[in-house]
Amino acid sequence: MSVIDLLDTQTMETRLLEQFVTVAAEGSVTRAAERLWAAQSTVSAGIASLERSFGVRLFDRTGRQLVLTPAGEDLLPHARAVLESLDRMRDLATADDADLRGRVRLGIFTSMDIVDLTGVLQRFRRQHPLVAVELMTSPSGTTGLVQDLVAGRLDIAYTGLPTVPAGVVVEPLREMPFRVFTASDHPLAGRSSVSLAELADEPFVDTAHGFGNRIILDGALERLGIRRRIVAEMNDMPAVVRFASAGLGVGVVPDSGVRYDGAVLDLEDEVEPLRIGLAVRTSPEPSRAVRTLARDIVAARVG
């Protein structure tokens, strides 16, 4: 019997699928149990029950991490599809927004205040107490968030990518121009602007690969034929600015408006700004809870 046939049977319990999907996302029964507010033994028993039903092993253990077997990889997208279908069925049975229920997984940047997200979430929680909102981040920045969105691990995500995959729509939230950040005693500190060519021999501080700003700047440098030397890679833009202020190197990142103790110069080259937006998948159709939270976040944007 194929995986799809098994999912079509009447004996499959939704909670077991949710446990399976959560363990796959977390790579750990312990962390999955914490997310599900369940006992670890309950989650372990659920996975064992699925494996007995399928007659296959779904996870292998690699050190302390659980990884999907080929059979588990085959099952995962179908299990997600079943859970998403059930969410949409609940939507149809819900009379109005006051009765919204379900779960929304939101991928965010913790280092930038794109909107007043805490205020949005406080209001959303008061108005829709039956909706569980889970906040997630990615060490690979906006690239990781969009990958998680496409893979179904997120329902909504911030993005700063110049382009997004098919099946993803983006609502603009904020636009930030690139500027050059240096220490206050840097030889360039007294100037108002500088070109990328003049920075070619400078040590750079930047965000890691995968961040939208890094992708944009790398593209601009490549078009100019400039190869730079990066001495430090950070996991957020404010850290780049702080280390540039301390004289570790120059930082060429979008100006998010954070307080800065060093020098700030305009960039003479035409580099497209970082455009932050809110990304949502178009298929399967987002649940009403997802659409409602996305609408609230977009409504909170400035300008």
Image (spheres, rainbow, N blue to C red):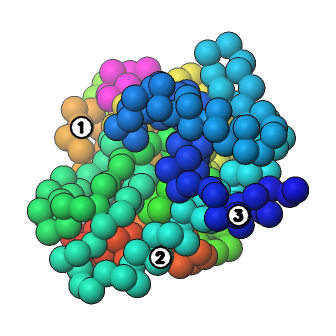
- Determine the residue positioned at 44% across, 63% down: 156
Residue 167 on the magenta segment: no
Nearer to me, 2 or 234: 2
Pointer 2 or 3: first along the chain: 3
Residue stretch rendered in magenta on the structure: 242-248
Residue 88 is tagged as 2
Q: Mark 1 or mark 3, which is nearer to you?
A: 3
Nearer to me, 267 or 114: 114
How many marks the image carries: the answer is: 3
| Res. 169 in view | no
Inter-mark Cα distance, 2 to 1: 47 Å
Q: Which residue is mark 3?
A: 9
Report the amino acid beneath label 3: Thr
Residue 243 on the magenta segment: yes
**Residue 90 in picture, x, y percent from top left:** 40, 75
Q: Which residue is mark 1?
A: 260
